[in-house]
Image (spheres, grey):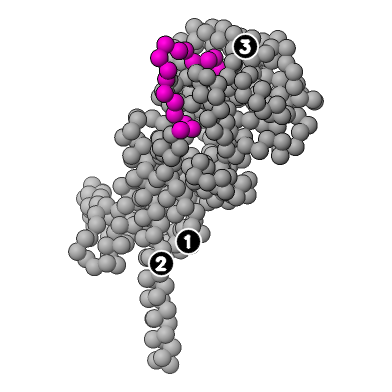
Amino acid sequence: MRQTFVVLHRYVGLVMALFLVVAGFTGIFIAFYDELDACIHPEVMRVVPPANQAMLSPVALTALVLRQYPDAMITRIDLNQVADQSRRFRLQPRPGLPESSVLNNEVFVNPYTGQILGERKWGDITQGTINLLPFIYRLHFSLALGSVGDYLFGIVALLWTLDCFVGAYLTFPAPQRTSTIRIKTKEQHWLSRWWKAWKIRWHGGSAKRNFDLHRAGGLWVWAMLFVFAWSSVAFNLREVYTPVMDTLFARQSFDEKIPTLAQPLTSPQLDVSAALGTGRQLIQQASHDDAFTIHHEAKIYYDASKGTYTYVVNSSRDLSEKTADTAVIFNANSGEQLAIYLPTGEAAGDTITQWLLALHTAQVWGLPMQIFVCAMGFGVVGLTVTGVLIWLKKRRSRKLAHQLKGSRR
């Protein structure tokens, strides 16, 4: 069985190698996505707050943008206003219009004046450096191949998750054939032999050093590798992640039970301003009923296919100030509450998922976690490269042995 696992680990690793190198290398930059994006084009991402002038409301800014893009619609409005940052809006073609009617789907606006500072078609690297970070993001999650890449990365993530356990098993020392040692002594001996797997023989030659870097390197960061692998399944292969997690843990269904309308509701009775008022009332009541504290507004978005608004805030149920997933869904005509979602503390499956995704994207613990995730990107690349080098060495050894065997005949 051990030899079978060795073969599985070897060839699954080779299948994953390219994907993991790309994911690891691009993850180095994704850990500082917002900071790097702003550094490349500060004239678009940053503003200088004028003295004694308040920012325009998100609703007013939305109206200003739509006047300049009459063929577009905005279904999501970010509500958390930061004094020195531009506001970004995602544009979509109005119903019935072709995709080409909106050339650029992301617009950056001065929140004090409403001036358009820049725009881009998110992820289109042909537009130059303004899309460098979005393009790296696309590479990270899908090799920039769209839905095909999403599924490919999802399958690789699933293989990676399983291989985490195979790799850990292969670090365990092989069982000794002895029956004379007492159980306690046997355990101590097993642990002492396993401890060798955590060490690196720096002076044992390049082959041993490379092998130890692969084995010990994987052991020391095994927990985070598993987090990356399984959370990648959550990002790219929900068809597998959701059933597995639902089998093991409870989960809030959120909006899944809200039916899709026969025809999209393109003109709801509640406009955005009225929807904001309704959302605020509903979330305040929910905070009282479910005992959580609201920190700040995050966003509101409209789903025409279901005729619903979703109002999202950052609350004490979120993992950090960077994450905002506390949400209420309500009918866009009547304002009736349809669902409430609390990211942590309500259902174990949701809490675990929130932690997995937050750790993967460095959304908790501030700068130290960003640096750690960046370092893990280097680590994933290093583990992949050392694994390939081990395979190449063994392949050369097997080929040489085969040649020697043939020459003796």
User: Which contiguous range is marked in magenta?
Assistant: 43-58
**Residue that badge 2 annotates:** 391
Front label number (2 vs 3)? 3
Main SS, magenta region, reads loop
* Residue in view at x 61 percent, y 46 percent: 146
**Residue that badge 1 annotates:** 14
Type of the residue with mark 1: Leu
**Residue that badge 3 annotates:** 273
Point out residue 379 in the picture as x, y percentages from the top left corner: 35, 50
Contact, CB < 8 Å: mark 2 with mark 1? yes
* The C terminus: image quadrant: bottom left
Point out residue 350 in the picture as x, y percentages from the top left corner: 51, 27
Choose the circle earlier in sequence order: 2 or 3: 3
Q: Residue furthest left?
A: 203
- Tell me: 63 left or right of 208: right
Type of the residue with mark 2: Trp
Q: Is residue 45 magenta?
A: yes
Separation of residues labelled 2 and 3 (CA atoms):
61 Å
Q: Nearer the viewer, residue 291 or 245?
A: 291
